[in-house]
Image (cartoon, rainbow, N blue to C red):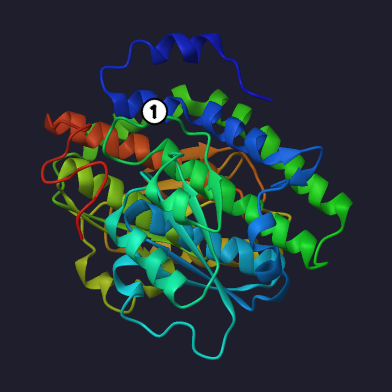
Amino acid sequence: MTPTNNKANASNQQHSHAMRREIYEQPQAIAKTVEKHLKDDTIFPGHFQAIEGALRTFEKLIIAASGSSRHAGLAGEIMIEDLSGVAVDVEYASEYCYRSTHAAVDPIVMVITQSGETADTIAAQREALTRGVKTIAISNVPDTTIVREAGAALITGAGPELSVPATKSFTTQVTILYLMALFLARRRGRMTSEVTRSYLQRLLRLPNSIEEKLRAWDDLAEEFGAKHFQAEKFLYLGRGVHYAIAREGALKLKEISYAHAEGYPAGELKHGPNALVDDKLPVVVLATCDHNDPDSVLRYRRTLEVMKEVKSRRGPLVTVATEGDKEVPAIADHVFFVPAAPELLLPIVEVIPLQLFAYHVAVRKGYDVDHPRNLVKAVVVE
């Protein structure tokens, strides 16, 4: 299952920045994450024994996280709700302790952290424990405070991530959340074993699909970045589960290029942000589509209308679209094409061109992408 591409592996050894190398490591990291948590079509075998009682009775899942991990949680919210029917709320870890989020519900709290030592996220987990709530931790690093104190822990297969901006840690967190959505859907009788297996097969094929496209995305990102690196502000748009990726794409650009970037739901453009659109504002749009999903098609068609609106105001359009799409290129200035995938798997694929776009914008500006100013890898102080 682990992808092996000699050309990509050779390229990995030549990367001048840890961030770019770690972007290229994502197919292997995603494959390893699935291998760690799947055995003979059984998802998370033996992982939840300590909280089995809570899993039988809980009414709501509350996700607490910060930064990129929170964006993973936003994608996970839609994955879990759509596939399993479990209600999900996503909180900023730094706000969780100050809110009465448990009113009239019996929840489980899931905390997500790259380092396992994020101060706000540890505080959120400890607050949940004082409220008598069982917790699940998703971490990229084992044997950390948050893992030791959690009721159950799910460790990604990302391995060490040296660059401050999250790349492979993010996509592996989203991979675990997708597995959680399938796990809960199967457990709650929302999905048969055969349907679950078909979803897993699509997930298993994803790493090779990504590896085949990395070089092309990298080249396009360098080209698009050269055209837009002087822009001072960017707007990122996405609908549904893709809104989380718009947020994450904007954060990546903001972190390492120091340009102001904001992620918005595509349908909110007319409710304020439209005032910003002109020929100096690059608008980055997630315009992928699962043509086997009627809801995805509806969102896609409405996203095309938003793109036309931007174009009518001379806004430069950088887009991510599904391979074979003929309508997006007719509107957009620049297009990254990603392999076709089910709607709820598309976020794992479509975020990678945006990571590369942010990387090349920052490199073109001459910035240290691995060590952005004022940022640290693990925020260990509240």
Asked if residue 130 lies left or right of residue 362, the reply is right
The residue lying at 35 percent from left, 82 percent from top is 99
Decide if residue 301 is in sight here. Answer: no
Decide if residue 41 is in sight here. Answer: yes
Quadrant into which the C terminus falls: bottom left
The residue lying at 69 percent from left, 55 percent from top is 49
Q: Is residue 97 above or below residue 15?
A: below
Between residues 268 and 192, which one lies in front from this camera angle?
192
The residue lying at 71 percent from left, 47 percent from top is 46
The residue lying at 26 percent from left, 51 percent from top is 282
Q: What residue did someone put label 1 on? A: 22
Quadrant into which the N terminus falls: top right
x and y, in percent, of residue 95 in the image: 31, 73
Between residues 249 and 174, which one lies in front from this camera angle?
174
Asked if residue 137 lies left or right of residue 86, the reply is left
Q: Image quadrant of residue 10?
A: top left
x and y, in percent, of residue 3 in the image: 61, 21
x and y, in percent, of residue 101 in the image: 44, 82
Q: Is residue 156 above or below residue 103?
A: above
Q: Is residue 328 above or below residue 39?
A: below
